Image (spheres, rainbow, N blue to C red):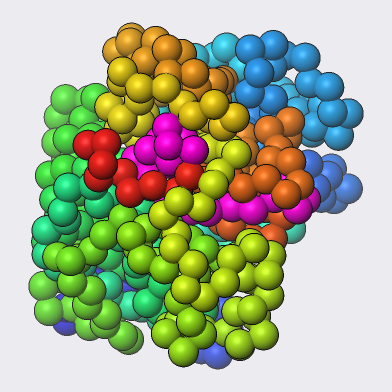
Amino acid sequence: MARNIIEKIWERHVIAEQEGHPAVLGIDLLLLHEVTSAQAFQMLEERNLTPFAPDMCVATLDHSIPTRPDRFNIIDPEARIQVETLRSNCSRYNIRLYDFESGYQGIVHVIGPELGLTRPGMTIVCGDSHTATHGAFGALAFGIGSTEVGHVLASGALLQRMPRTIKVNFKGELKEGVFSKDVVLELIRQIGTAGANGHVIEYCGEAVRRMSMEERMTICNMSIECGARAGLISPDEITIEYLRTRRYSPRGKEFESAVENWLAYASDPDACYDREITIDLTSLEPLVTWGTNPAQAAPVSKKVPDFSEYVGGGSSADFQAALNYTGLKPGDALEGVPVERAFVGSCTNGRIEDLRIVANILRGRRVKEGVKFYIVPGSERVRSQAIEEGLDKIFKEAGADFRMPGCSMCLAMNDDVVPAGQRCISSSNRNFVGRQGPGSITHLASPATVAASAVKGCITDCREYL
């Protein structure tokens, strides 16, 4: 019988199951960071347990750390405790930790793929909402809570129910100036923030097959924003070529043997799904959000919609509350809305391809006076490569601040906070109320749109600068 990739991974990882009850699902990789791991390790200590398999765990510092050049000096006492606790736990239990200056430290969903730890057919979990990023490789990857992190540490498994499935077919060719961030925002705009609740999405179609791995990661990263448990893409030759030279990828004959196994996970051509959605990308334009969730988005060239035109779900009261918070109203042009801050980074768009796009727009231009533009690489490796390519000089000459790796301005959990009342255009994944700081206003967009807006000082169509 034909099966989709989700069914194939599930069947290979079920340890035990009983009708009417959650299955025991084996986990291949547990990713850890400083914010959600402390409680899990404490659970082990209280029960006099040790990690089931320390070698299936990989840790890094990302959420609460500074991105200043002197990031070793962690001023915030809570962040300092989080970092020291993770270091202590990793040392105690012999778990790999990619610390500052390791050469590999970075956002957990950036370093996993770039090190070759993320591979097709794996089950991957982390105490973070955007774990679905790893699904770009054909892995079943999803976020879990701190208690579940403890369960995986102790047993290498989780209780899970087989999810329902959605096939999203992206067809058509993207126009110049339209990027994978625009694609996933369009999906969320069309189906809403609860449109995929209880499902795992498989992204398919000619548009996906043309995308690089970095573009695919952006799409899978934001699966949670339409309610999906996870999102993934069947592996292909682009996946294989990305993995071929990674630090922890197999070598030689072992790699070729692994490739055969990895490609076997791809969905069968006539596989079935619970739902199917097709989106034609031919006429898609650069998008930007105008409200307080990622579904509240529109083309940069258009206006804020009226509630009768809005398809993202929710009540009219919620719709109005979002506009009240962002200071906009139906009929307002999005292009030209002033911004005081701009941010490129996060696990959504902090990779080298993103930084190259930004550099292409900033080359020979200056960030608008009065705008603070933070460019934060997703990892030490990304930062090193950007410097090797001379991108850092372009950023500096343009007046942007090229910082050290970390989650940074994606969330108000570190020093990089947007002040109350200020408006930030951001390549991150969430524009919730206060997400980038109490009273801050966030507009989500592609790195290209962010860079163009930083130059002009207002929300801007990036196609002017390409």
Q: Residue 444: x and y, percent? A: 49, 53
| Magenta run includes residue 282 | no
The reply to whether residue 78 is in sight is yes
253 vs 456, left or right, is: left
* x 49%, y 67%: residue: 332
Q: Quadrant of residue 413?
A: top right
Q: In this view of the protein, which residue sits in the foreground, 99 or 386?
A: 386
Q: Residue 327: x and y, percent? A: 64, 63
Q: Residue 409: x and y, percent? A: 62, 38
* x 59%, y 66%: residue: 328
Q: Quadrant of residue 329?
A: bottom right
Q: In this view of the protein, which residue sits in the foreground, 317 or 199?
A: 317
263 vs 108, left or right, is: left
Q: Residue 141: x and y, percent? A: 45, 56
Q: In this view of the protein, which residue sits in the foreground, 370 or 293?
A: 370
Look at the picture and state if 163 lies above or below 428. Answer: below
Q: Which residues are magenta?
A: 437-457
Image quarter of the C terminus: top left
* x 68%, y 33%: residue: 416
Q: In this view of the protein, which residue sits in the foreground, 39 or 130?
A: 130
The reply to whether residue 249 is in sight is no
287 vs 324, left or right, is: left
